Amino acid sequence: MAVKVLVVDDSGFFRRRVSEILSADPTIQVVGTATNGKEAIDQALALKPDVITMDYEMPMMDGITAVRHIMQRCPTPVLMFSSLTHEGARVTLDALDAGAVDYLPKNFEDISRNPEKVKQMLCEKVHTISRSNRRFSSFASHAPSPVASAAPSTSHAPTSTLGSTAPVRAAAPVRAAASHSPTPKRKPYKLVAIGTSTGGPVALQRVLTQLPASFPAPIVLIQHMPAAFTKAFAERLDKLCKISVKEAEDGDVLRPGLALLAPGGKQMMVDGRGTVKILPGDERLNYKPCVDITFGSAAKTYGDKVLSVVLTGMGADGREGARLLKQGGSTVWAQDEASCVIYGMPMAIVKANLADAVYSLDEIGKHLVEACV
């Protein structure tokens, strides 16, 4: 059965081009188009598509406001188009907060120069998010925004990220039933390492906002994300969290209460001096940053003193790094299927019998606090 797609963009050229690319795939059907956010809501209600592709900047109603309304009225996986700029990153992160599942760079030059590559990437994204976990949808209209639910006002107090008058809602993952994994044992971990991909920005926000400023272990974060996005994402997390968060730079020192986010397009490793090394992205690797690379360096450096967590994401990045961590005696947790947007990376951990515990998203932050001494 073909995946039904609604294409939303105020540019006639882009609307037609995206529709042509998608329609060339026999397993995808473009069921409608819209030129602004208001039309998108009406079309989503009328056509009930499986996936919506959404631009941000449109007349009458912008894409983020439209996503919020769609998540309240007819929750549907949304793929945002974004510019690869700092402002584009901020807007995309707002859209993910509002309930969008994933994003793609909006680059007219790439469409002209590399049509086959663009077609493959776009169609793969559409198919992937059409299979995303939509069991959270019944909670979407009730879930508090991560901004609203963050820590009380401090030096890192959250600020509003959108000047819209629309109600602020987040299409948060499902509040899964309590897992059957045991309460974690307390241990003097020297490092917490968290890897994630699709669905990760919101998931990381949910986990990290539960940690106190006095969290006793250093944290490294590996999120599959373009180079232009990671700085804006780290700044956003830093405002929302009680702990400090920054985009990692070569030579940064690991310290308690600080989370270092791997920069997009590069690789991050940790060394025995308690610092991070930032290396150029290797073209032979699919992911830049790569969870396996960081996990593997942590296993070599810290032996059995690493607590690693694999959150929502497509594929199996993190599995081989987790295998090395397990061989060294470290601990590996995976997010449960019910609370994942895409149950790929955590599933790879579970299927390889590498998970010491499987927790719902809402449990992970609490258990991190309990486990680290």
Image: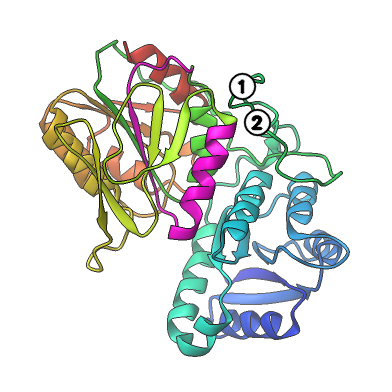
Q: Does dot 1 land on a helix, a strand or a loop? A: loop
Among numbered discs 1 and 2, the one appearing first in the sequence: 1
Question: Residue 58 placed where, x, y %?
Answer: 79, 67
Given residues 73 and 65, the one toward you in this image is: 65
Residue 105 within the segment the image draws in magenta: no
Q: Is residue 281 left or right of residue 206?
A: left
In this picture, residue 292 sits left or right of residue 238? left
Q: Which residues, given as a range, are shown in magenta? A: 213-239
Q: Crowding at label 1, few (<14), some or many (≥20) Cα neighbours within 10 Å?
A: some
* Quadrant into which the C terminus falls: top left
Residue at 35% across / 43% down in the picture? Answer: 347
Quarter of image, res 48: bottom right
Reading the image, the residue beneath label 1 is 151
Label 2, on which residue? 158
Circles 1 and 2, Cβ within 8 Å, touching? The answer is yes
Give, as a three-letter code, the residue at label 2.
Pro
- Type of amino acid under label 1: Ala
Considering depth in this image, is 49 or 168 the residue closer to the camera? 168
Question: 153 or 199: nearer the eye?
Answer: 153
Residue at left 70%, top 86%? 13
